[in-house]
Amino acid sequence: MDEITLKMLKEVADLDALPTGAYNLRENGKAAGRNTTANIDIVTKKDEPGIDIIVKPGTKNESVHIPVIISQTGLKDLVYNDFYIGEDADVVIVAGCGIHNCGGSLSQHDGIHTFHLAKNAKIRYIEKHYGEGDGTGRRVMNPSTVIYLEEGASMTMETTQIAGIDDTIRLTRAEVKAGGSLVVKEKIMTTGDQYARTDFVVDLNGEGSSANLISRSVAKDNSRQAFVSDIRGNAPCAGHSECDAIIMDNGSVSASPKLTANNIDAALIHEAAIGKIAGEQLEKMMTLGLTEAEAEEQIVNGFLS
Amino acid sequence: MLEIKNLSYRADDGAEILQDVDLTVRERFVAITGPNGGGKSTLTKLIAGLYQPTEGQILLDGVDITHMSITERARLGVSYAFQQPVRLKGLKVSDMLRLAAGKDKKNVDYCGYLSEVGLCAKDYINREINATLSGGELKRIEIAMALARSTKLTIFDEPEAGIDLWSFQSLIHVFEKMHEETQGSIIIISHQERILNIADKIVVLRDGRLVQDGTRDEVLPGLLGTTREACNVLLGKMGGTA
């Protein structure tokens, strides 16, 4: 692996080398390494670009890493990755994508990830998007995540986009059956003239199903962000969404939360707060000896931690 | 030593909040008291740099800090524990104590600072400074931060407010310990007799003016008398007895 690939792996998947356990590394639109285990299989799709990740029922304490690195300017990459998680399995999936664009052309990665969690399966899905490079070419990522949770299945999705992605439209669609639970923790920071839109639709279809969407974002400089969510309670269920945003400079954030209750026992709550860093928060930090810029940095880092 | 000379502060609407205050602080504990709206918080915020005075001068150990920023004063050794501590989403108690102790410090005695204010480090160190903390808990964390700062001048704005279950004795112990370590001065805004009782010096502010400034023995009896007299008058009017 060259230096850029190693650095990007560190940024998106916190890896210093190829991981242990199951993995699939995709680099510049091509497979660049794969490992499977007795319980986790990875199969290349025949009809479209992408892979199937199949986790056997009952698999515990294993992880799958599927990092994607793009370092070639002008490359547009589209993949369909399908995850089949067997009953009672409990695994961690790390899917980061990094774009290093030193050229003048647009580099783009669109990943469509579909999760099928069988009864009582459980996953923690960590997704980190990162871009860098001093070229003028834009770095674009449009991830789609489609989630099907069978009875009692649970998924926690931690998604982070802190730096370097110029344009992103992030779609998440989920259907949750009885006793299933979906938690999404999203962190986004945009700078310069970047744009990020995040759009959730969650259908809570079974009794006792739940969803908790937590979005924290910071929009700096002239960047723009949009948060759109629709939690639809179609059964006795619990849904909660929370959009918390800090705007700085000329940043702009729009939040459009929507709740739809189609069942009398659907308990749905939304919270949204957008604002600048309060003067008294900065003052508190400054009384500890920090400069105003250091205070802002600490507050933003804490907010997105 | 802190020296305040002819300090005045006029609000944006032209109201005279503080007028011509002269004060020297070289004692261990200096209590600032007086009626609400008398200018107590304004005076301490002027000292910490949160407000800029309209007139006058502030010297810390002979250095003119009148026009210095909050940050510069903090670095010179001024700490400020707010009356209403702010909440900071995402930042943890440990983050704030680390920042208070100084960026270079690697081994921060989280446990020591928190136990001094009656909080168990195990339960609090990873808590976020957000709405899940009660006012009393925030207040104690604010005091723990001042302890971690350990500077030559520390200002507490009504530290006893909201610390219901924690004893005054413990709060006083914190002040004593802080002085032991810093050998500096502690300014405490308070209405509480038990706090005034430990003060080496008591300053009374009323209507933006310093009306009394002396040792505890000089000032406290008069203050208590005034309060009781006022109370008696009020009760008398209502037909009751004190």
Image: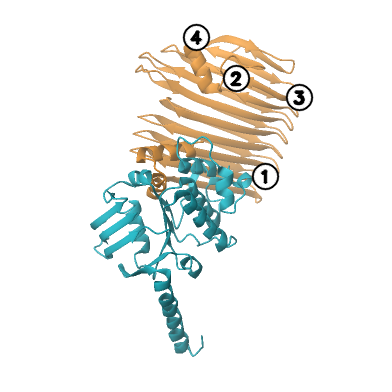
Chain colours: A orange, B cyan
Disc 2: which residue: A81
Which of the labelled discs sits on residue A235, or is there none?
A: 1
Label 4 environment density (alpha carbons within 10 Å; few <14, some 14–19, many ≥20): few
Residue A60 visible here: yes
Q: Earlier in the sequence, mark 2 or mark 4?
A: 4
Which residue sits at x=37%, y=68%? B214
Residue occupied by mark 4: A2
Q: Are marks 3 and 2 on the same chain?
A: yes
In front: mark 3 or mark 4? 4
Determine whether the residue tagged by mark 4 lies in a helix, strand or loop.
loop
The residue at the far bottom in this view is B239
Chain to which mark 3 belongs:
A
Same chain shared by disc 4 and disc 1: yes
Residues marked 3 and 4, same chain: yes
Q: Label 2 sits on what residue type?
A: Asn
Q: Say whether disc 4 or disc 1 marks the residue closer to the N-terminus.
A: 4
Q: Chain of mark 2?
A: A
Tell which tag, 3 or 1, sits nearer the viewer. 3
How far apart, in angstroms, are the residues tagged by discs 3 and 1?
Answer: 28 Å
Q: Quadrant of residue A180?
A: top right
Looking at marks 1 and 2 on the same chain, the residue that comes earlier in the sequence is marked by: 2
- Tags 1 and 2 both on a single chain: yes
- Of circles 2 and 4, which is in front? 4
N-term mark: 3 or 4: 4
- Residue A248 point in image, percent of width and height: 37, 39
Residue type (three-letter) at the residue carrying disc 3: Pro
- Are the residues at dot 2 and dot 4 in contact (C-beta closer than 8 Å)? no
Mark 4: which amino acid? Asp
Q: Nearer the viewer, residue B72 or A197?
A: B72
B191 and B175: which is toward the camera: B175
**Which tag, 3 or 1, sits closer to the chain's start?**
3
* Number of the label disc, if any, that sits on residue A57: 3
